Image (cartoon, rainbow, N blue to C red):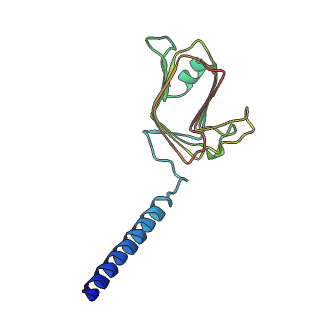
């Protein structure tokens, strides 16, 4: 009987050790992601996007932005992959002074934003300053402390 109990204890300990090792290996695999190449949301790759109340200029310059800023046809930024490691603002997308235009940011991927504190104290994947009438959805942000930050927004 004592021999049978020892076998059961040995089996349980062996299973626990195997499970712990397995979880450790899986965790190590998941943390070894290469963020140097951003996954593509679609066909556009940028290092950062900066809009300072100049939506019309942005929409006329870039294919990934379109619309007229009205409620029924807002400016739309979509299908952009951003590797923000070289962004001068520390953010992947920075939008400022957009109180009157309606806008949507969707289906974008942002990686490597450094979150530098030098630009109005906080940066992140997406930073909004003095903005209203914006909608953000279907965004993937990888490897960033602050995903979306805002200041003076309504």
Residue 113's x, y, as percent? 61, 43
Residue lying at 49% horizontally and 29% vertically, measured from the top left: 64
> Vertical placement of 67 versus 138: above or below?
above
- Residue 28 percent location from the top left of the image: 48, 64
Decide if residue 144 is on the left or right side of residue 11: right
Farthest right residue in view? 118
In what quadrant of the picture does the C terminus appear? top right
| Image x and y of residue 75, in percent | 50, 19
9 relative position to 92: left or right: left
Instruction: Give coordinates of residue 12: x percent, y percent.
Output: 33, 75
- Residue drawn at point x = 29 percent, y = 84 percent: 7
Q: Residue at x 70, y 42 (%)?
A: 116
- Left or right, 104 with respect to 132, comes to left
User: In the rendered view, would you say 73 is above or below 44?
Assistant: above
Residue ID at (62%, 46%): 85
Is 77 placed left or right of 119 in the picture?
A: left
Rendering quarter of residue 72 = top left
Q: Quadrant of residue 119?
A: top right
- In-front residue for pair 98/50: 98
Q: As drawn, which residue projects farthest toward the bottom?
A: 3
Instruction: Tally the numbered discs.
Output: 0
């Amino acid at each position: 009987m004592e021999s049978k109990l020892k076998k059961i204890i040995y089996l349980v300990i062996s299973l626990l050790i195997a499970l712990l090792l397995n979880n450790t290996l899986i965790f190590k695999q998941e943390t070894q992601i290469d963020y140097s190449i951003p996954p593509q949301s679609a066909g556009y790759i940028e290092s950062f996007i900066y809009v300072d109340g100049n939506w019309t200029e942005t929409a006329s310059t870039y294919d990934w932005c379109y619309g007229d800023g009205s409620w029924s046809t807002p400016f739309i930024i979509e299908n952009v992959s951003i590797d923000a490691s070289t962004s001068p603002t520390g953010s992947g997308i920075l939008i400022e002074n957009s109180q009157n235009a309606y806008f949507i940011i969707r289906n974008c991927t942002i990686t490597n934003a450094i979150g530098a504190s030098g630009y109005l104290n906080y940066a992140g994947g997406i930073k909004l300053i003095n903005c209203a009438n914006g909608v953000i959805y279907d965004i993937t942000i990888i490897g960033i402390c602050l995903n979306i930050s805002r200041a003076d927004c309504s």
